[in-house]
Image (cartoon, rainbow, N blue to C red):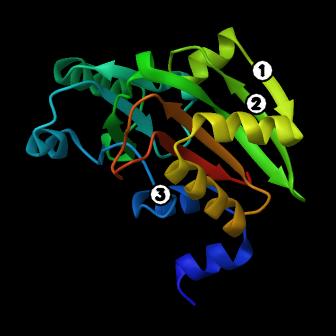
């Protein structure tokens, strides 16, 4: 049994390492353009905003958004001084927050939905600090369905079929985003940890 079969067979993403493995191979579906180094970003020709995250559990407060290449280089130097290796970092395109519809976390357990969300047009962790809304049941499902393109909604339901009790973190926009066509939703994380 390979690693994918083992994780999928369990119906859970139990740790960050398994999450990053599945995310890296595109298993969760639509994601922003991503890179593993500044060199990869330069080679791709990307010249817009950059987001820097850590694969090794660095606090979310250390995640930065919409940096220029020069700012990204400086931030990596700062992290290096704090003992964070550049090999533990991952990079993605900054998202068009001005186009945000809804973002948050949804859980489906025994066919009941719980949604924690925000409509503030900022990166999710910052937006949730300003506004955290909650709903459940059919209201939660309807709110998600209204804000996701049909293709994005189908992707979300397919993930719930594989990982029925997982938290799925997402952001939906007024425009198509990410590496897959005709989707307005980035599926940031699927987790049971």
Are there few (<14), some (14-19), or many (20+) residues within 10 Å of tag 1?
few
Q: Relative to 189, say whether 174 is above or below.
A: above
Q: Which residue is mark 2?
A: 116
- Which quadrant would residue 60 be assigned to in this image? top right
Q: Upstream in the sequence, badge 1 or badge 3? A: 3
Say which of 125 and 80 sits in front: 125
- Labelled pair 2, 1 in contact (Cβ < 8 Å): yes
Q: Could you tell me which residue is drawn at 33 percent across and 39 percent down?
A: 91
Q: Residue furthest top?
A: 130
Secondary structure, mark 3, is loop
Q: Earlier in the sequence, mark 2 or mark 1?
A: 2
- Badge 3: residue crowd in 10 Å (few <14, some 14–19, many ≥20): many
Helix, strand or loop at mark 2: strand
Mark 2 neighbour class, 10 Å CA radius: few under 14, some 14 to 19, many 20 or more = some
Residue in the picture at 57% in, 62% down: 18
Horizontally, residue 174 falls left or right of residue 129, namely left
Image mark for residue 133: 1
Measured from the top left, where is residue 2 in percent x and y?
53, 85
Q: Earlier in the sequence, mark 3 or mark 2?
A: 3
In front of the other: 70 or 182: 182
Residue 20: image location, x then y, percent: 49, 56
Give the residue number, with chain letter if any, for mark 3. Answer: 29
């Amino acid at each position: 049994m390979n690693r994918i079969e083992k994780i999928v067979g369990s119906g859970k993403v139990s740790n960050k390492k398994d999450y990053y493995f599945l995310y890296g191979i595109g298993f969760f579906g639509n994601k922003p353009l991503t890179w593993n180094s500044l060199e990869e970003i330069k080679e791709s020709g990307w010249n817009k905003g950059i987001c820097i995250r850590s694969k090794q559990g660095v606090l979310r407060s250390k995640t930065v958004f919409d940096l220029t290449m020069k700012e990204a280089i400086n931030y990596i130097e700062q992290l290096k001084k704090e003992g964070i290796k550049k090999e533990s970092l991952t990079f993605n395109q900054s998202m068009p927050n001005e186009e945000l519809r809804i973002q948050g976390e949804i859980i489906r357990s025994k066919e009941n939905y719980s949604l924690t969300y925000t409509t503030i047009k900022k990166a999710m962790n910052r937006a949730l600090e300003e506004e955290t809304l909650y709903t459940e049941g059919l209201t939660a499902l309807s709110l998600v369905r209204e804000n996701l393109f049909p293709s994005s909604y189908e992707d979300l339901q397919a993930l719930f079929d594989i990982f029925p009790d997982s938290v799925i973190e997402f952001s939906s926009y007024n425009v198509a985003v990410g590496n897959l066509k005709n989707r307005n939703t980035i599926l940031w994380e699927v987790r049971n940890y």
